[in-house]
Image (cartoon, rainbow, N blue to C red):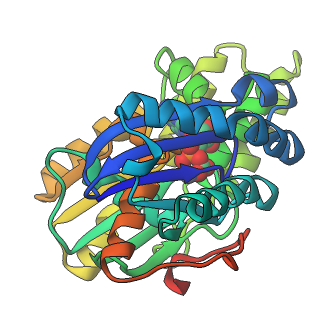
Amino acid sequence: MIILGIDTSCDDTCAAVVEDGERLLSNVVNSQVVVHHRYGGVVPELASREHIRNIVPVVTEALGRAGINDKDVGAIAVTVGPGLVGALLVGMNFAKAYSYASNIPLIGVNHLEGHILSIFLEERPPAFPFVALTVSGGHTNIYHVRGFGDYTVLGQTLDDAAGEAFDKIAKLLELGYPGGPVIEKLAATGRSDAIDFPRAYLSKGSLDFSFSGVKTAVALYVKKWRDPKAGDNTITIADIAASFQAAVVDILIDKAIAAAAQVGVKSVVLAGGVARNNHLRSRLQNMMTREGIDLYISSPEFCTDNGAMIAVAGYHRIIRGEEDDLTLDARSRFPLDQI
Ligand code: KG4
Ligand code: ZN
């Protein structure tokens, strides 16, 4: 079955065509980075406007690259949440109209389920059960994944998401948006042990995260560092980026290992935009090898938001007999254990 997957949850207009929940036929992402860059973050109204402009060309390109016509599409899957409601509504209303006009099933998908299942686009996907760590601009969660549609939240962030922390520190350092890639690049030339930023592990055994402490510590440090009388002039901006990145990565790794031990699984999946970070990927790989755990990481193009992961999640809902109708609505908050 060929599924057209649509995601407009944040600032990327995404459409992809996937066959049988695993074979990628096309994947088109129209990034709005140039629109939001100068504001240092996503402006919701601008995101909605750009989605309206882009959705038809992006879908047309996805179908064209897949070499198919509208009549070859067996169902349309669309992100219903979590995300920016105005942005989500653009993809959802497009999907409703497409489903109605083509007379094909419509299926709403949770964006977080999409991130977890993006790993099934890889050649060597994991077997169930596994632990999934999803780290993006809007979310930082750990799940116990027992099967398609069978998820338990083990931990989540109590404040900022990991990617959001990268974005806020980049804004503070006047490096632009999105922060993750630029901090990673800068950190490569810095010393990760230059500054000992706090790592918040919370209570013993907790799999929750908190990144507001490290963010505040970096902000206070930068304020002092910028003061010519008080700052340590042996510290470079690259040292600050590297030390911040190391603090975030340490927490993510420790919690992923603790989660696998807690539920007794030997496979861990890393997904979401922050999973593009090479420092995180390589350090996590080293630690997992040492722990005897198999690590699965999505390819970079499937880490950040994309329609392919939505098509995969939609496919597994449809083959379980699920289908939505035109009353489907967008949800800004949508915890994965509520589906
Ligand atoms: O999954 P995603 O595309 O969108 C959300 O669902 O949020 O993730 C975007 C987030 C942004 O916060 C961005 O700064 C972060 O992923 N990101 C990175 C890297 N590339 C993207 N964070 C750290 N290192 C990177 N290389
Ligand atoms: Zn995402």
How far across and down, in percent of the image, does residue 250 sit?
A: 43, 49
| Residue at 71% from the left image edge and 59% from the top image edge | 93
Q: Would you identify the image quadrant in which residue 277 lies?
A: top left
How far across and down, in percent of the image, does residue 227 sit?
A: 88, 22
Nearest the eye: 124 or 171: 124
Nearest the eye: 44 or 132: 44
Count of labels shown? 0
Nearest the eye: 88 or 336: 88
Q: Is residue 91 left or right of residue 304?
A: right
Q: Is residue 295 left or right of residue 110?
A: left
Q: Would you identify the image quadrant in which residue 42 lies?
A: top right
| Residue at 60% from the left image edge and 23% from the top image edge | 182
The relative height of residue 338 versus residue 285 in the rendered view (above or below) is below
The relative height of residue 221 versus residue 259 in the rendered view (above or below) is above
Residue 33 visible in rendering: yes
The relative height of residue 185 versus residue 97 in the rendered view (above or below) is above
Q: Quadrant of the N terminus?
A: bottom left
Residue 279 visible in rendering: no
Nearest the eye: 179 or 58: 58
| Residue at 83% from the left image edge and 30% from the top image edge | 224
How far across and down, in percent of the image, does residue 318 sit?
A: 37, 74
The relative height of residue 71 versus residue 282 in the rendered view (above or below) is below
| Residue at 58% from the left image edge and 51% from the top image edge | 7
Looking at this rendering, what residue extends furthest in the left direction? 292
